């Protein structure tokens, strides 16, 4: 699990998306939040990575710790702090399902950031 997390961070910090094939299966799904429609396949994941990243010089620190690991599923607590102006931080939970060969088959992110409301306000 630690090796996969290190490879994920390395791929995020590397220009291009060639490393995604080492991390994800060809038909992997990737949810940016639990209720969003998943991205499907390496091409859609690569497009999102190119859109979401600022580039290999993006200044941030990432800390990850495995919360649970059972069979082929891992839950990871992730903290990311971006140093650029204005600085920003995120706390995420990642739910990752792995294929038999150790690549991610399904990725689901639960992102949180300072000031984010805990729940939606329901209309009365």
Image (cartoon, rainbow, N blue to C red):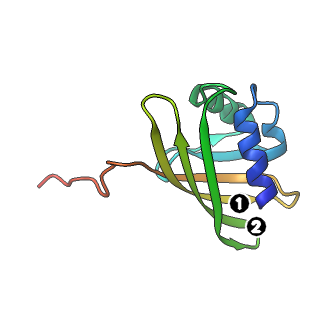
Q: Residue at x 75, y 38 (%)?
A: 11
Looking at the image, do the residues carrying marks 2 and 1 touch, with CB atoms under 8 Å apart? yes
Decide which of 84, 17 is in the foreground and name it: 84
Q: Position of residue 98 (x, y in %)?
A: 76, 59
Q: Residue at x 81, y 36 (%)?
A: 19
Q: Secondary structure at mark 1?
A: strand
**Residue 24 appears in the picture as rendered:** no
Q: Callout 1 environment at 10 Å: few (<14), some (14 to 19), or many (20+)?
A: many
Please identify the quadrant where the N terminus is shown: bottom right
Compared with 9, 56 (above or below) is: above
**Residue 64 appears in the picture as rendered:** yes
User: Which residue carries the number 2 mark?
Assistant: 72
Please identify the quadrant where the C terminus is shown: bottom left
Q: CA distance from mark 2 to mark 1?
A: 6 Å
Q: Callout 2 environment at 10 Å: few (<14), some (14 to 19), or many (20+)?
A: few
Q: Position of residue 3 (x, y in %)?
A: 81, 55
Q: Is residue 24 left or right of residue 112?
A: right
Q: Give the image quarter of residue 14.
A: top right
Compared with 86, 116 (above or below) is: below
User: Which residue carries the number 1 mark?
Assistant: 97
Decide which of 102, 37 is in the foreground and name it: 102
């Amino acid at each position: 699990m630690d090796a996969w997390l290190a490879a994920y961070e390395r791929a995020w910090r590397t220009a291009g998306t060639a490393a995604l094939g080492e991390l994800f299966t060809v038909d992997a799904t990737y949810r940016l939040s639990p209720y969003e429609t998943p991205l499907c396949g390496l091409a859609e994941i690569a497009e999102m990575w190119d859109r979401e990243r600022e580039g290999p010089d993006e200044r941030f620190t990432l800390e990850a710790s495995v919360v649970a690991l059972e069979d082929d599923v891992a839950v990871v607590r992730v903290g990311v702090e971006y140093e650029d102006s204005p600085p920003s931080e995120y706390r995420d939970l990642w739910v990752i399902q792995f294929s038999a060969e150790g690549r991610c088959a399904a990725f689901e992110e639960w992102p949180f950031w300072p000031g984010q409301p805990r729940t939606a306000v329901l209309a009365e």
